[in-house]
DNA sequence: GAGTATGTTATATG
DNA sequence: GCATATAACATACT
């Protein structure tokens, strides 16, 4: 049994590779939707018709979204907040199975305790991208395009980083890491950063996500100096040992080093 | 029981 | 209509 968990871009990329290595080229012999609430595009009947007895041809990832090409259609998967993809033997099960696709001797299982994940049927990549309105994938976007898409917004730079329509793939944890590495305070207004600073931030987006993928999204294996090895209030900053601070930005817990990431804006976006 | 959690989207607000 | 902020979703865990 193999499993992957934790759903931001690097983790979804690991899930994609798992699918690619384990079931691509196989044929779907059964598909069971165990929670129809998670079907957000098409319906169970359409999914059966499109996928049953068809061959698994390939895998695509865009941001945190996974698409598996089966027959002439695409199986859409999103892991939400607590979802994970698992490849099991056909007689094995997980505790919160929501979708089960049997391919040969293996079962691809979407397990998701909180049910924030989703699945569905798309007929093409174009249909998927236009309907979701996602920005470019965070690993693919150039620093120039990143800067252009970020520029001119008033909201906190962290909120902009996590907006999937601006750039797709960054969530709460990696947003903190990217801003920590770049020494930018997460509450800084986006329009208080220069185009040069935004371009540099764009370079850091790729660097941080690429580094995580290189260690198979195992946060404990990240290089020294990475926040995500011990992202907790009061823990020492991995760079200067100052106790880390925790604030709420955009409704999400945000961990930062108050010394390395000085707030230079005039008005704080943090509510007290 | 209260508080928190790695995400997205509908709804509210200015 | 636009940009932004917030609530709501379902469940597990401390």
Image (cartoon, coloured by chain):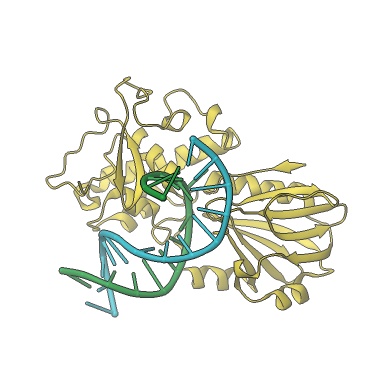
Chain colours: A yellow, B green, C cyan
Instruction: Tell me residue A139's x, y (percent).
Output: 49, 48
**Residue at 50% of width from left, 73% of height from top?**
A131
Asked if residue A180 lies left or right of residue A207, the reply is: left
Instruction: Tell me residue A107's x, y (percent).
Output: 79, 54
**Residue at 21% of width from left, 52% of height from top?**
A191
Asked if residue A166 lies left or right of residue A214, the reply is: left
**Residue at 27% of width from left, 42% of height from top?**
A197
Q: Is residue A209 above or below residue A224?
A: below
Look at the image and tell me in which quarter the N terminus of chain A lies: top right
Instruction: Kindly indicate the quadrant of the structure image that contains residue A180.
Output: top left
Q: How many marks?
A: 0
Q: Is residue A41 above or below residue A140?
A: below
Q: Nearer the viewer, residue A225 or A127?
A: A225
Asked if residue A144 lies left or right of residue A263, the reply is: right
Q: Residue furthest right?
A: A105
Instruction: Tell me residue A17's x, y (percent).
Output: 68, 47
Q: Nearer the viewer, residue A125 or A261?
A: A261
């Amino acid at each position: 049994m193999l499993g992957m968990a934790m759903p931001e871009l690097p983790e979804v990329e690991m899930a994609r590779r798992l699918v690619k290595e384990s079931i691509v080229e196989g044929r779907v012999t059964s598909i069971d939707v165990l929670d129809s609430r998670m079907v957000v595009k098409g319906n169970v009947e359409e999914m059966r018709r499109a996928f049953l007895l068809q061959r698994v041809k390939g895998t695509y990832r865009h941001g945190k979204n996974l698409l598996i090409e089966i027959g002439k259609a695409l199986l859409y998967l999103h892991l939400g907040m607590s979802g994970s993809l698992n490849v099991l033997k056909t007689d094995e099960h997980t505790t919160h199975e929501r979708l089960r696709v049997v391919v040969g001797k293996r079962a691809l299982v979407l397990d998701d305790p909180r049910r924030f994940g989703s699945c569905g049927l798309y007929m093409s990549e174009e249909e998927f991208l236009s309907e979701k309105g996602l920005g470019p994938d965070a690993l693919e976007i150039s620093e120039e395009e990143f800067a252009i898409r970020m520029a001119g917004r008033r909201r906190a730079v962290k909120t902009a980083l996590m907006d999937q329509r601006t750039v797709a793939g960054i969530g709460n944890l990696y947003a903190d890491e990217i801003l920590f590495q770049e020494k930018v305070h997460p509450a800084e207004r986006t329009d208080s950063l220069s185009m040069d600073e935004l371009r540099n931030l764009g370079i850091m987006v790729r660097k941080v996500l690429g580094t995580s993928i290189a260690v198979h999204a195992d946060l404990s294996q990240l290089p020294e100096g990475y926040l995500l090895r011990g992202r907790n209030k009061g823990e020492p900053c991995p760079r200067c040992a100052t106790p880390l601070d925790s604030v709420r930005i955009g409704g999400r817990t945000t961990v930062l080093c108050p010394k390395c990431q000085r707030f230079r804006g005039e008005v704080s976006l943090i509510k007290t």
